[in-house]
Image: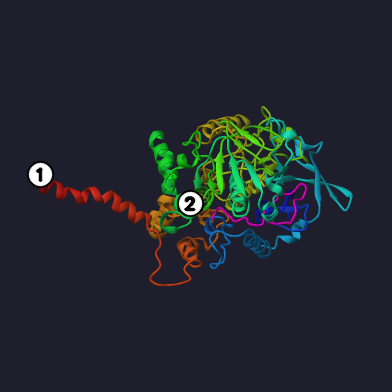
Amino acid sequence: MGKRVAIVGAGVSGLASIRCCLEEGLEPTCFERSNDIGGLWRFSDYSEEGRASIYPSVFTNSSKEMMCFPDFPYPEDYPNFMHHSKLQEYIRAFAHKKNLLKHIQFETLVSSVKKCPSFLRTGQWEVVSEKDGKQKSTIFDAVMICSGHHVYPNLPNGSIPGLDHFQGHCLHSRDYKGSEAFKGKRVLVIGLGNSGCDIAVELSHLAAQIMISTRSGSWVMSRVWDDGYPWDMVYITRFESFLRNFLPSFISDWLYVKRMNTWFKHENYGLMPLNGTLRKEPVFNDELPSRILCGTLSIKPAVKKLTETSAVFEDGTVFEAIDVIIFATGYAYAYPFLDNSIIKSRNNEVTLFKGIFPPMMEKPTLAVIGFVQSLGAAIPTADLQARWAAKVFTNSCALPTTKEIMDDIDKKIKKKLKWFGQSETLQTDYITYMDELSSFIGAKPNIPWLFLTDPQLALQVYFGPCSPYQFRLMGPGKWDGARKAILTQWDRTIKPIRTRAVSKAHTPQPFYNLLRLLLFPLLLLPVLFEFY
């Protein structure tokens, strides 16, 4: 075996990292503080310190064909959007198939990751782990941080006047574990993210009244899109990405707002974002507009102040006799085992090259996997990040100079502000980012070559869903089953929903639909000539 790599966390990012290290001949040791794999997706009846926490009713927002490990498709009978328990089954199956469990030390806490005294020469790290009350120090050649960013709740302490005087019950969304305790209650949910909306919608069936308070609004999307297909298989395509990135911004922005407002008019529901052209992550909820229509849930602006029993909103309206406030206010980013200046190396902001490598390191032997956020799924993103990081550790790939790295970071920050606005998260365009990473390792799909050599596949790759299989189609780490997986992805999408066959199944034909759109004006020409 080659260099020793410490991996912190055995969620999907950690498992991807173990596998990619093994592919590159590295020797991975993964430290997991709990007794099981899965990270965020391992459900527990209570929230555990230092671990991500989800509620019982969580379903995925990405469809199965878009969120798989690139060489490990889901079984065809799996639903397109999965309950967390179904996804955990898949994660376990992947870990067993790839023989990853033997590289994991369970119930082991990483308490410290520090540079060795010889770091300038060796790039090595001292990792202090703790198990059964006993500490152990081990030297590693590289470290991959895969502990996620849904661990430490961001609570609005001090930012809402009167919070200290509120007499009802307060909790963060990570502590929500079911709706029964809220039956007949009057509940205020602060925050319009996915968790806040999921919880509010669920409670609206049992609670006396639900209100969601939001500062800036949000686009709300359904998982079900054009012709009933999963949203991401229609929206996340190379052709759509090309249009979004290369059309003039005023046209692209107009199309985006029009698209987001197709399902329902957000301004009528109080949900309209303050800046609708920003590509911030939308909320995925199939019920929210319906619950607002039924009057069991209302949307309100930001909370101006709290009293002992009520909330006064920025518009002067009041929600009285509140029993419970649920803060769906997201999470703070923290790695308590690591010197904060490594991740936040400039102006106390998270500064990472391509969202992975700290830019000021003398040796590129530390990588953060799974920190970047986009509309794309976490699993294929983490897989590609880990592939590149492992190659950097083995010197198969080299990073640019520090100046080039900082110039790239500055450029990306400006682009992020333009597209996503001000936020602490490292947001990016999914396909652009994935193509960038895959080009570093020689695995980016060569679209012109595919059109010349395999037109059937090329049409699916360019006009169809940008599914994870594309990034194991060619180059290092190529999977022989990738072509077949791409050509049959719609079959696996239709299979679990077509339980009553009444006619031939229909699958999208985006390229031919585009041709019809382009040819339509030509068909009108004879009519126009005849008329004149």
| The quarter of the displayed image where residue 152 is located | top right
Q: Is residue 146 visible?
A: no
The three-letter code of the residue at mark 1 reads: Tyr
Is 113 or 252 nearer to us in this picture? 252
Label 2 CA crowd tier, 10 Å (few <14, some 14–19, many 20+): many
Report the residue at 73% width, 45% height from top: 142
Q: Residue furthest front?
A: 321
For the stretch drawn in magenta, the main secondary structure is loop
| The quarter of the displayed image where residue 326 is located | top right
Residue 421 on image: x %, y %? 54, 33
Q: Is residue 16 visible?
A: yes
Q: Identify the mark nearer the N-term, 2 or 1.
A: 2
Mark 1 secondary-structure assignment: loop
Residue 525 on image: x %, y %? 17, 48
* Quadrant in which the N terminus is drawn: bottom right
Q: Is residue 53 magenta?
A: yes
What's drawn in magenta, residue-wise?
Answer: 41-62
Please tell me whether mark 2 or mark 1 is closer to you in this view: 1
Label 1 CA crowd tier, 10 Å (few <14, some 14–19, many 20+): few
Position of 479 compared to 183: left or right? Answer: left
Up the image or down, 270 lies above or below 453; here it is above
Q: CA distance from mark 2 to mark 1?
A: 49 Å
Mark 2 secondary-structure assignment: loop
- Looking at the rendered structure, which numbered label has been put on residue 23? none
| The quarter of the displayed image where residue 99 is located | bottom right
* Quadrant in which the C terminus is drawn: top left
Residue at the spot of label 1: 532
Is 463 or 506 nearer to us in this picture? 506
The three-letter code of the residue at mark 2 reads: Pro
Residue 376 on image: x %, y %? 54, 48
Q: Is residue 459 magenta?
A: no
Residue at the spot of label 2: 445
